[in-house]
Image: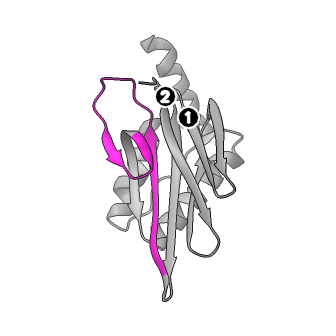
Amino acid sequence: MSDLTEVELLWLEKRIENRIRFGRAVTEKILDRRRRLLSFAPGSIFAFVRWTSNDFGTAISRIDILRAVAPGQRCSTVPYVKPGGEIILRLSGWPKVERVLQLIDAVEALDINPADAAHEYWHHVHNRLSVNENPRPYTKGRHQAWLHRQRVMR
């Protein structure tokens, strides 16, 4: 059994798209023209976007921000993710998914890798968007506080 969390990415034109929006994969394996397997180290954060359509339009639009777990740690099962992950954010429906993607872009605009942003921020985004409220923006000050807390807690 591997210590890594594996995510299968799939792309079938105009039908299925599973992709990683952010995160630092430690390995990548190309399975065929339409499938890849990315692996993440325990503790790493990544965003997994799933989109599926049928003859009538979009059927599924979902984003999960997950923390890769170490062997033996509790985790939630997520399709295409083995063994699963700790769910930090899970939203579905295009309007909410689109809003999360915009917030990820805003974090990147601050020159911050979203995988390095405070986990609590992504929890906050999940909670606020779940009840159709606007989340507070992520700021450099909030990020500096997060980094300081990480140093102190070690």
Badge 2 vs badge 1, beta-carbon distance below 8 Å: yes
Position above or below: 28 against 154: below
Q: Report helix, strand or loop for mark 1.
A: strand
Corner quadrant of residue 22: top right
Q: Earlier in the sequence, mark 2 or mark 1?
A: 2
Quadrant that contains the C terminus: top left
Say whether residue 51 is left or right of residue 12.
left
What stretch of residues is rendered in magenta?
A: 58-82
Callout 1 crowding tier (Cα within 10 Å): few <14, some 14–19, many ≥20? many
Main secondary structure along the magenta-highlighted residues: strand
Q: Position of residue 108 (x, y in %)?
A: 67, 46
Circle 1 is placed at which residue position? 39
Q: Is residue 97 magenta?
A: no
Q: Position of residue 144 (x, y in %)?
A: 58, 28
The residue that appears at 55% across and 34% down in the rendered structure is 39
What numbered label is drawn on residue 142? none
Q: Position of residue 120 (x, y in %)?
A: 41, 39
Corner quadrant of residue 25: top right
What numbered label is drawn on residue 4? 2
Q: Amino acid at mark 2?
A: Leu
Say whether residue 41 is left or right of residue 79.
right
Q: How is the image coloured?
A: one colour
The residue that appears at 37% across and 68% down in the rendered structure is 132
User: Seen from this angle, which residue lies furthest left?
Assistant: 74
Callout 2 crowding tier (Cα within 10 Å): few <14, some 14–19, many ≥20? many
Position above or below: 113 against 99: above
Position above or below: 146 against 88: above
Q: Position of residue 68 (x, y in %)?
A: 44, 33
Q: Amino acid at mark 1?
A: Ser
Q: Is residue 63 magenta?
A: yes
The residue that appears at 53% across and 41% down in the rendered structure is 46
